[in-house]
Amino acid sequence: MMDPREFLEILHVAERLKDTPRHCTTTKGRRESVAEHSWRISLMAFLLRHEFPELDMDKVVDMCLIHDLGECFTGDIPTFVKTDSDRDTEDSLLHQWVLSLPPELSRDMSALYEEMDAQQTPEAKLYKALDKLEAVIQHNESPIDTWEEHEYELNKTYAFDTVAFSSWLTDLRKAILTDTLEKIETEGQNS
């Protein structure tokens, strides 16, 4: 059983994500935090409960909530610059922390991370798709003058492969692409 002090210590570690900036900005141009990204993909999973009734959506929400906890220890490294070495370091630090948690919590989290990494279950595939889609949606919401040159093409192509397992998600990705193209057409000078 977890005592209140252990619970608080876990929350203190997770709180770091509130101050860990991500690459993208909000609509008003403020750098978003990893915590905000994790919250929104969790919300996306909750909102899709009826679109994917055959999935254990509580498990998907859990995956979304914990997916970036490793960034408490390493900070956020954008996917387009993250190396295998960066991933190994993040995974190692996260694994050490998870093992230090109360046994039942450590077991639950380890099982989720293993399933997420394997990318074999529909729940793991949905979590991964939402993670990538949220990033593209956020780019569409951010001011275009915050986009780096390579992001124009990235926003047009990113995550199509990840959503291919679902016609609904593929349609969502196409709608996001429509928004990207419209944003570039109306706000941007690059392509």
Image (cartoon, grey):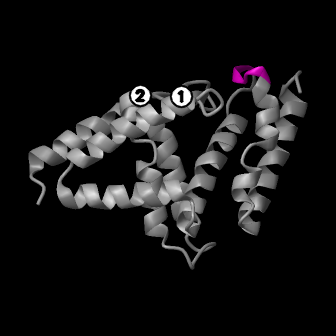
Front residue of 90/144: it is 90
Q: Which residue is mark 2?
A: 74
* Helix, strand or loop for disc 2: helix
Magenta span includes 147: yes
Say left or right for 106 vs 187.
Answer: left
Q: At 47% from the left edge and 47% from the top edge, which residue is drawn?
A: 39
**Identity, as a three-letter code, of the amino acid under mark 2:** Thr
Say left or right for 14 vs 124.
Answer: left
Residue 115 % position (x, y): 47, 61
Q: Main secondary structure of the magenta part?
A: helix
Do the numbered discs 1 and 2 sit on residues whose CB atoms are within 8 Å? Answer: yes
Give the extent of the magenta segment. Answer: 145-149
Residue 191 % position (x, y): 89, 27
Q: Disc 1 versus disc 2: distance between alpha carbons?
A: 8 Å
Tell me: residue 7, above or below residue 145: below
Q: Which residue is mark 1?
A: 77
Magenta span includes 17: no
Residue 8 % position (x, y): 17, 43
Crowd band around label 2 with a 10 angstrom C-alpha radius: few (<14), some (14–19), many (20+): some
Task: Name the image quarter holding residue 16.
Answer: top left
Say left or right for 36 vs 79.
Answer: left
Front residue of 58/150: it is 150
Q: At 28% from the left edge and 47% from the top edge, which residue is drawn?
A: 98
